[in-house]
Image: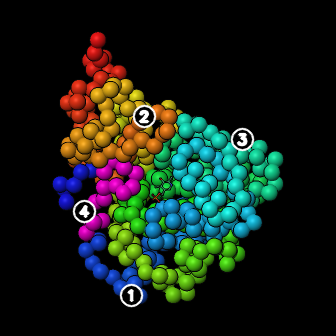
Amino acid sequence: MSADPILLTPGPLTTSVRTKQAMLHDWGSWDADFNAITARVRDSLVRIVHGEATHECVPLQGSGTFAVEAAIGTLVPRDGHVLVPLNGAYCQRIAKICKILGRRLSTIEYGEDQQVRAADIAQRLLEDASISHVALVHCETSTGILNPLQEIAQVVARHGKGLIVDAMSTFGALEIDARTTPFDALIAASGKCLEGVPGMGFVLARRAVLEQREGVSHSLAMDLYDQWVYMMRTTQWRYTPPTHVVAALDAALEQYFDQGGLAARGAAYAENCRVLIAGLNRIGLRVFLPSEIQAPIIVTVHAPDDPRYQFKRFYDAVKARGYILYPGKLTTVETFRVGCMGQLGASGIGGAVDAIDAVLVDMGIQTRHPERQRA
Ligand SMILES: *Cc1c(COP(=O)(O)O)cnc(C)c1O
């Protein structure tokens, strides 16, 4: 197991041995032991956002996008109107979901290095009273930019609209408190900051809203209302659950709470991010975002400005040194990404910087570092 390269990707990421070991069993989907695991996981997920009094956790089979699509499809009425501020690929994905599901859509466009502004949302809500929901991505994993969730949640609540938050890459590491940050739905998944394995998404939905969403979904399998009601009635999942994924998430959550929960996870990622950026700067690589708007989740790095740089060769060489990088997702500038999350092994994120450094030297690639410049 230790021979696997370390994943510097924002899910799937490198999980602990204990989390992997939790999958060495088989469970019956009807069995009370498995249903107790499901119940425990759902309770823990609600507890992380302090939503016990107001919110319900509805898990869903599949990757994170399945849960986002299910949330829009179930929680936004068919005649609803969704405002999606766009500053990256995951907001674009939400906009596409709205189009495919036939929900009326409005957007506000930003550059990929610009945060969404609460004042712009307020303005649009004032101008167009037909907007019923705002759908926001908390950390745009495509760049690593953090959007000001708390401010935006206040604006949306003040206008009496519903907020749907894709908190996929922040849930469990950055503080979100349902008692002070009002949202109708917050969506995340098993294989991100909670450090489980991928395969289960979940929606923390406001109970008072969910109760009114019978028959709204366009889809049978993606209907969160049905999934919730069935689970409440039977304790079971509607349709075959990803049993091993749920068991691994249960183990990952146990370790998460043992290690100090959100504060500890957030601090560990912030330290990884700090060491990573300092290390990249030291070897002459430039990060894409200013640190004030950088979430401690994933860092976008400008590719070295050298014709010898080619992502695939660079990637393969870094992989041979034990680390898996993530390609960039910007259309206009060449970048690569490095995740700050997961079990990073004994040498930590510093080991990743060393591997990147060694590969740049091996490939004779010039960076902004004074000693790496050629005449
Ligand atoms: C990972 C992620 C998703 C879900 O992506 P999947 O590939 O479906 O798991 C959605 N939004 C954000 C911000 C993410 O980081």
> In the image, which residues are magenta?
7-21
Q: Alpha carbon of mark 2 to alpha carbon of mark 3: how far?
A: 31 Å
Q: Of discs 4 and 2, which sits in the foreground?
A: 2
Which residue is at a point 50% across and 82% down the rendered structure image?
238
Residue drawn at the location 37% of the way across and 70% of the way down? 245
Percent across and percent down for residue 285 are 36, 28
Q: Amino acid at mark 3?
A: Ala
Q: Amino acid at mark 1?
A: Asp
- Badge 1 element: loop
Check disc 3 and report the residue beneath it: 119
Q: Which residue is mark 1?
A: 31
Looking at the rendered image, the disc whose residue lies closer to the viewer, 2 or 3, is 2
**Residue position marked by numbered label 2 in the rendering:** 334
- Residues under numbered marks 3 and 1 in contact, where contact means CB atoms less than 8 Å apart: no
Secondary structure character of the magenta stretch overall: loop
Q: Secondary structure at mark 4?
A: helix
Q: In x, y percent, where is residue 247?
A: 35, 73
Mark 4 crowdedness (10 Å alpha carbons): few <14, some 14-19, many ≥20: few
Residue 15 magenta: yes
Label 3 near label 4: C-beta < 8 Å?
Answer: no
Q: Which of the numbered marks, if any, corresponds to residue 304?
A: none
Quarter of the view holding residue 18: bottom left
